[in-house]
Image (cartoon, grey):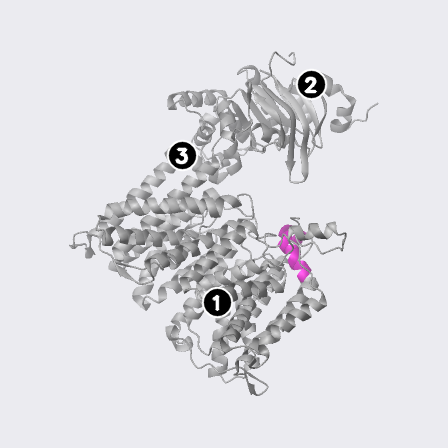
Amino acid sequence: MSSEKKQPLLEARDVNVHYGQFHALQDVSYTIGKGEIVSLLGGNACGKSTSMKTILRLVAPSSGSITFDGESTLGMSTADVVSRGIASVPEARRVFPEMTIEDNLLVGAYTRRDGSAEIRKDLAAQYDLFPRLAERRRQQAGTMSGGEQQMLAFARALMSRPKLICMDEPTMGLAPIIVDQVLETIQRINSELGLSVFMVEQNAELALSIAHRGYVLVNGVVTLSGGANELIRDPRIREAYLGQKAA
Amino acid sequence: MDTVLAGLINGNAYALIALGLSLVIGVANVINFAQGSLFAVGAMVGWLMTTSLGLPLWVAVIVAMAVTALLGWVINELAVKPFAGKAPIAAVLSTIAMMIILDASNELIFGPELRPMRTGLPDVSFQLFGLTINPIDIVILCTSVVLMVGLAALLRFTRFGRAVRATSQDREAAAQMGVPVNRVQALAFMLASSLGGLAGVLVAAYFTTISPTQGFTIGLAGIAAATLGGLGSLLGAVVGGLILGVIEAFGVSLWGDAARQIITFGVLLLVLWIRPQGLLGAKAIKKEPLTGTFFAAARKIRVPWWGVLLLVLIGAVPMVPGLLDGYTVQVGIQIILFALAALSMTILGGQAGQLSLGQAGTVALGAYALALLTKNAGLPFLPAVLIAGLIGAVIMTVVAAPSWRLSGHYPAIATLATGAAITAVAANWNSVTGGGAGIALIPQAEVFGIVLSSNSARYGLVFVVLLILCGLVFLWSKSHVGMYWRAIRDDEVAARAAGIATPQYKSLAFGVSGFIAGIAGALWAADYGFIDPKTFPPMMSFQIVIVAVLGGMLSPIGAILGSAVMVGGLELFRFSASARLLAYGLILLLLIRFRPQGLWTHFDWFDRLKQRFGRNKDSELEGSDA
């Protein structure tokens, strides 16, 4: 669990994002190590989702750099970063509702160029990992429950054979029992498949229960960072997120 | 049986156009009004290849599809891509601009006349189950079936097809998966456009006569077919096209070719009223309001009292007898008539955030009402004008009423259909409207016993009416009604949450707009003395929109300014009709891209200058996109 190995998988340095006049991210820096679960915590409209979008090159930063696997992502398209190994699980899952489970998964493999045999192999791997999806492969994704859609969103992200998966509030709007399953799945993806996870979350307690490290974002500025164990005991976190007054 | 076959051939063309429309609606959330123009381009390219150059039909098909695919790429680049993420009306108006540009260019290049087409196919026919079948029937049938099955397979089984479907269903999520959504959109656009071109060649080959101007009506029929089947549904497009074609064919065999338009738009209106999602409704149609603050994201220019007085004085100059020559005064009258029509549009667009693509229909209604009331019923002029206005108001509220609960693209289609249906009725109701021959010898305007026959008096009449209506619009916009309208325009959901009865206030906006448009039409009829359906063609609806957009929708002055520039300016250059249309299209395209809020609104640099010189008068902020 040592936080930094020699070179982090992803490093964001002094990232600034402006939406017109609005300064959404201000000199935000963070790293994600290989095999790490890193959580970015914060309330509504603090810049969490924007951070994820800058990693995915859906939003271009006005200054600062993001390096992935030793390569600057500046000037890359979303397709470029996806094909280099960054997959994503969008906010509210966003599966393609009128496509079958299998077609959803194949869209996840869109950027791959290694032939249909390899892609078929990965399809089978996802069905092994999520047997529920195998049962329903011909069913339209929009007809599944929220928890099942979340599993599909994970599997879809895995189809691009990523090194890093970015997740935007993966537990949002799910029943508590499903939330536990989702967290367990994230841990499995991390430990069994060895993937790094970048998890944007409002619910600090949930996120820190599985993350190795965390950053706290307030109004576009990183105000706190550290190991998950330290953060969860930090009185400021407890006050801000868990509703307990600092002693 | 031959009727069914003819219907299927036409319906097949509608289906191909509707397929293209639905494909584009999916990936870009835009109704591509230029789809019909691509049909006309396809037809003309087909004519050029087969008849002028003597090449075989299959070469013509390939070249036409290539040319239209290329044009589709251009339309996407110029008219759709720049407006991603903006109010959908921007892209819709831009494709209307492209439609006007393509139609006008087509007419400028090839001339408007009908021409024969030789396909080079053997001139034989045979009988099958009582049907007379020609080689071209087989060609059309096979090409279409192969194409439609191929398209379905492409979308269902290929990587590109999955990308198109993913982009249609959730553009942002598709982008996150690494799908290059912009490239997918461009390719889908080209594919859709080539379907339009293909339909053009096939229909031209079938009817063996073609005209470069037929794209407009067939494009509208394609929109009707797509709506009938369900906007955005590809299977629906095919089904809708074939059904519409067969219904039309039976109507035409019963009532003659003139009935075609009434059937097309009647079917369209019925669908919108009863089942707007169409037969095979897609849930994918996005529900956001079409216009919103798009036209209003700017600040109003406030005119001081002496400025208004000055403008009135300048406007009154042609009223002085003998000062200006008759031609100039006539242009002045024309400017004011168009300004009145545009004024009716600013109520909808600038105040209530709605849009009508059928305003020419309401103007025509007012014109026919006045003609019939004064000529046949012998009513005096002024009451007849008022009644014409009221009829306009009632029709706009009643006929369009079922469409107000619609959202997304549907209200625009509904107004388009209403306007086109009115013109189609006028062209067919021979006993009342005189049909295609129109109504002549409409009595001249007469006010308090004085017949207004001199140029300056005729100008004076329209000018005074304009002043009165501008004053009324000004008072309305100051009243609580205007405030509620602006609330609906800026955020309909919030307005409803605040307790505003949005349907009622929207209908009031349509009613007031219809009243002004009806009066404009009445003055039109009295001034011309002769009207027929061609006086108010559907294209005029778009011209009215363009005049209103150019001037700016926030103030009545915008309508006048827009009309002065478009009607007066183009008159100055004495363009031919097609060149004038081309100018309208180009201006609309540029406007939507660079200055959608129109001319008569604050420029940014104007504000900065004001700040610099410290004159910091609070001015009313119109719209939230500051």
As shown in the figure, which amino acid type bears the numbered disc 2? Answer: Ala
Decide whether the magenta segment is chiefly helix, strand or loop.
helix
The residue that label 1 is drawn on is B571
Spot the residue most to the right: A247
- Secondary structure at numbered mark 2: helix
Range of the magenta residues?
B482-497
Examine the structure image and report whether residue A140 is included in the region drawn in magenta.
no
Left or right side of A56 for B424: left
Q: Mark 3 falls on what kind of element?
A: helix
The residue singled out by tag 3 in the image is B160
Label 2 Cα crowd, 10 Å radius (few <14 / some 14-19 / many 20+): many
Q: Secondary structure at mark 1?
A: helix
Q: Amino acid at mark 1?
A: Glu
**Which residue does the numbered mark 2 point to in the structure image?**
A228
Label 2 in the same subunit as label 3: no
Q: Residue B490: say if magenta.
A: yes
- Mark 1 is surrounded, within 10 Å at the Cα level, by few (under 14), some (14 to 19) or many (20 or more) other residues, namely some
